[in-house]
Amino acid sequence: MYSQSKAPAKKIQSCDWPIEQLPGLSAEEQLQLENCGITTTNILLKQANNPTTRLALANKLHVHPQYVNKWIALADLARVQSVGIQYCGLLLHAGIISVKQLAEIPTHRLHKQVMRLQVATMQRRDLCPTVDLVQQWGFQARMLTVDG
């Protein structure tokens, strides 16, 4: 009898983006975040990692906490390589607010939600990401939740 050695699973890297690339931020909000030392999405996630620090950041920036929560959700989703800054806003508008939630939702259900959103807002089915891409989002999200 012999033992088969398995190739180590490829580790998925969490993506970090310049804060100015995060969708939905005005130039003023970008500048305010940069003045607070928040220049990347990972720094934002680290500095506003719980409700208390999010509220403190909102107060410091003189914005409603809802905005900070939105930025956190976008930054978290953008950590997934295949989602990135290109699709994090689409996922947020489709009701996905975290990598954990993305990891747990069945592919077919998420694709249906994204398709419904694309048709409702753009009246175009052809702009919807493919099922394969949506499946990749879920796979990479699961890898990130396992890796931490």
Image: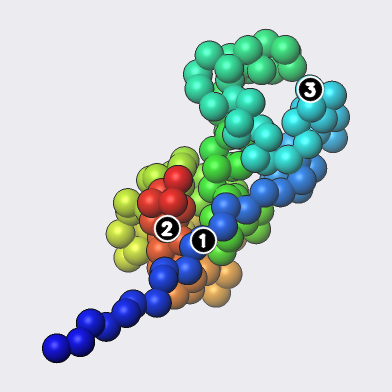
Q: Circle 1 sits in a helix, a strand or a loop, which is it?
A: loop
Q: Quadrant of residue 139?
A: bottom left
Name the residue carrying label 1. Answer: 12
- The type of residue carrying mark 1 is Ile
Disc 1 to disc 2, C-alpha distance:
6 Å
- The type of residue carrying mark 2 is Met
- Few, some or many residues within 10 Å of mark 2 (<14, 14–19, 20+): some
Disc 3 to disc 1, C-alpha distance:
29 Å
Where is the N terminus found, in terms of image quarters? Answer: bottom left
Residue 30 picture location, percent across and down: 80, 33
Left or right? Give the position of 7 relative to 120: left
Residue 10 picture location, percent across and down: 47, 68
Left or right? Give the position of 123 relative to 148: right
Name the residue carrying label 3. Answer: 36
Disc 3 to disc 2, C-alpha distance:
31 Å
- Few, some or many residues within 10 Å of mark 3 (<14, 14–19, 20+): some
Q: In the rendered structure, which disc, 3 or 2, sits on the residue that comes first in sequence?
A: 3
Residue 144 picture location, percent across and down: 46, 53
Residue 15 picture location, percent across and down: 62, 53
Q: Residue furthest bottom?
A: 1
